[in-house]
Amino acid sequence: MRNLKRTLSLVLAAVMLVGMMVVGASAASSDFVDGNEITYAEAAEVMTALGVFEGTDKGAFDPTGILTREQAAAIICRMLLGDDAENLTTNSTVFSDVAADRWSVGYIGYCAQQNILAGTGNGTFNPEGELTGLAFAKMLLVALGYDPAIEQYVGNDWAVNVAADAVDAGIAVSGVIMADAMTREQAAQMAYQTLEADMVRYASRGTTIQQPDGSTIIVGNTAAEPVSKTDSDYAGDSNDDTQQFCERYFADLKKVNGEDDFARPASQWKLKNDIIGTYPAEADGTFTTAVDKGDLYDVIGRTVYNDITASKPTDFSVYVDGDPVSSPDVADYFVNNETDDAKGTAKGVLTQVFVDDDNNVILSQIHTYVAQVDGGYDEENEELELDDLGLDTFPAVNTTLSADDFENLSAFEDGDYVLITAVGDEVKTIQAAEVVSGTVTSYTSNKNVTLDGTKYEYSQGYSSTYNLKDDYDLVLDTYGYVIYADGVEASNDYVFITNVAQIGGVNKSFEAKAYFVDGTTAVIEVSNADDLEWESTDKTKNTWFSYDEKNDGTYELGKLNSNDSASKDFNTTGKIIETGDARISLDKSVRLNNDTVFVIRRGDNVNVYTGIRNVPDVNITHLESDAEVEVVAILDDNGYADYLFINGETGELGVSGSVAGDRIYILDTDYESSQDADDNKYYVFDAIVNGEIGTVNLNSTSDVEVGLYGNVTYDADGYVNTSDLNRINNAVSGNDLRVWNVDSTIAYSSGVLSFDGVDLVLADEYTIFLNDGGTGKTTTPSRLARDYEDDNFKGVISAVYDGDAVIEVYVDEDNSVITDETVAEVEEAVSDAVVNADGAWGQNGDLGNYVAHGTWNSDGTKVTASFEQSAISTESNAITWDTARFLGSLHKNGATTIVYDGVTYVWDKDGGLQGSNWYDSSDKGLTTGDNANTLVKALADAGVFDGDETATATLTVDGVDITITFSVSE
């Protein structure tokens, strides 16, 4: 365990990719949702595996979150006590602001008792207060055995003394300002460095003498010395002279020196038999571009250079992507003052130099390659297939990756660009590539390209040509160099031409029926029919063309290369496209992805869908004799369809499925007539469109009924086709849109809304809409259950599913109105928001640090709040706290205004006083202190919180009166 370099993971995080590693005993950084944001990945992984650090309840490590005082106490206790830290009692020390049931109370008590961390004065601890790096370093030094009194970690000079000892002990984190508040990842790094710091002891702690002024001094003490193997309490490696922290407190933790997959010096951390991870050592020199031989010479210096070139040289080894270079020539890499590039160094190549204590030199070079995900993650086989994009530089590796070897494959989707590294025929690391998009304004062959004014250099081995002023996607490697470029065709670059007819005479001009990829149609004049070799006898084309609209309004069309398109005439009924299909068989196999634009023509109506997840099922439902439905695709260089045109008549094509297209809920059959600038009539209906309350424009009023419609289509003018409206009128299992006629009670429990034998499992995010006499409103499931707990609901309930969960519910009650302002809702606001936990009442939600003392009861408009006299004091008035929570609960349940004593109060969303945020609306904003304009202050001024007699206050909440009676008993 001795003489080990401190291997910060900065190099790994900054210049390497998300790597293949054996899963350790606990979460690795890639297990956290924010793992790619962690700078000190090695420290985070090791300390998490030891159970010292934990992620948040949302699966994040929160690397930049500020370390709090109670978190620091927990970290130290877990480092010193291991699993026993969870058994700490609350008997050690009690601070007035640390409740007996607070999660951190045991940790705080232990640290205070052991003089590791003191309170903040006046009997308080401030558990959520920020902790500086100096304060955390002091705690770790004490954990190492340093006596805070002897080392003068108290008094005016405590910070200077702590900083000096932290550096000497090797726990100070390079580049971190210790006087600043410490982030969680910085704390993890400091704790990690403490693992390999020496434990210390004192032969004598001296005598403490109290001075006349009350201060104390220590005399006769010895200096702190490392714990050695001759000490009776030594616990460590028998080959070591001194004991490290990890040897004493984490005997099952081992660090073994070796090499990683790329043959770089590395350390492997193991906890018992579980590998936490393997981490490369910190390089003496790191480069990601071409580097002079002289610069590499400066990295190793003259002494090392002489050693590796001497008659009895030390070892000099070169590895390229993990493979050894046979008999490397030192002169190819290291020459003093030489400006020629060192062999193999280039833009996008990671070159690292490692020099050990014996002057052995290892030079490592690692290349990054680009690939594209082919088909998305295969959940059944737990595999991800990569496409090499036809690049000659791509290594000969197995492009089928298994979840057994990589932890993050499921995060990638079809068509994603990824960066990989490889050793031999095995991919070793994979990560998502950064893609920048824009217009190319200039480029220099084999050097760079300028996109929207920003110049990007090429990665080694890549170059491309471009059409100036065209849009491109540039794929960047880990270091910001272009590793691949892909042309992006603008949405108006292509047009599908169906029918053509010659117009005019000698000039042979043609008109053509054109379908654009944004769903619009037009009859255009084609100016270059001669170039296209069109003849007067031509009637149909059914072909994609590129186009350029001229200043005179005519269009110049361009033919597509046969390799750029694929087509097929379907002449039998059946499926053409199914939602989610990744391929379609035309005259060649065509790949589809989430960027494919589907243009579907059905007679005069055209619909456009983007992506295989959004296009509905398309079927040929009927064909006349000898009729055909043409399907024509434009392909990119990789065989993916950029655009797919399905050319059908209204009676031929059927579109099915649900959420794939727009969905609307018509609230009322009343409408307003209107007319656009082109004299097209349309009709405006109140509706809920894709989950948003508003209006929708229809091209007709025929057959429009109240209810839910799926797969809404639009005519050429952008108005909803009423002829295609598909009103949902059943509840077929498996369909995304379902409707029930209901005559039953309604119940709600733990995310499940139940009625008439139907259970709707609500998604994490959902909305319940009410059709209130033609007006769209929202409500909650508990309100519905309360209103129809005893009496049957008679009406229609519709639901929108996303998988097995429901994201939208539509409620339409026959001849009845469910309102938002009823006495029953006020009762719910009280009963739901004021909850009892172990005898302490409080607001259901974020209550801050207070513990309430009252008992609250409600029967709708009358509320009783009862308190014991012992709960009332000048410094902490429990009635005030409870009332503030109660008022906050009204806001959380949707209240917008409260009127008290003739004054209207509104909620301040930015206020920091929780339930006290209701302020006088006639003022400009919330004010606090003695001049507060809050409702709580008004109630206090009225004497309702005095606690010496029964008091009442009547509040009008969104038009509903609530009378609160405050009573105090001995």
Image (spheres, rainbow, N blue to C red):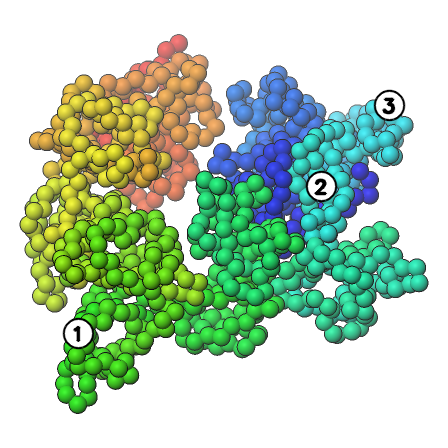
Q: Categorize mark 2 by other alpha carbons within 10 Å: few (<14), some (14-19), many (20+).
A: some
**Does 129 appear above or below 658?**
above
Q: Amino acid at mark 1?
A: Lys
Point 93% across, 59% down: residue: 312
In this rendering, position of residue 303 left or right of residue 545? right
- Rendering quarter of residue 966: top left
Point 87% across, 34% down: residue: 239
Q: Is residue 826 visible?
A: no
Point 30% across, 75% down: residue: 547
Q: CA distance from mark 1 to mark 2?
A: 73 Å
**Does 848 appear above or below 434?**
above
From the image, which quarter does the N terminus lie in? Answer: top right
Instruction: Give the residue furthest to the front.
Output: 626
Point 32% across, 75% down: residue: 559
Mark positioned earlier in the residue sequence (3 or 1): 3
Q: Categorize mark 3 by other alpha carbons within 10 Å: few (<14), some (14-19), many (20+).
A: few
Count of numbered labels shown in the rendering: 3
Residue for badge 1? 539
Question: Which label lies toward us, 3 or 1?
Answer: 1
Q: What is the number of the mark on residue 232?
A: 3
Q: Secondary structure at mark 3?
A: loop
Mark positioned earlier in the residue sequence (3 or 2): 3
Q: Position of residue 479 (x, y in %)?
A: 59, 61
Q: Are marks 3 and 2 in contact (CB under 8 Å)?
A: no
Q: Position of residue 311 (x, y in %)?
A: 93, 63
Q: Secondary structure at mark 1?
A: loop
Q: Amino acid at mark 2?
A: Gln
Q: Amino acid at mark 3?
A: Ser
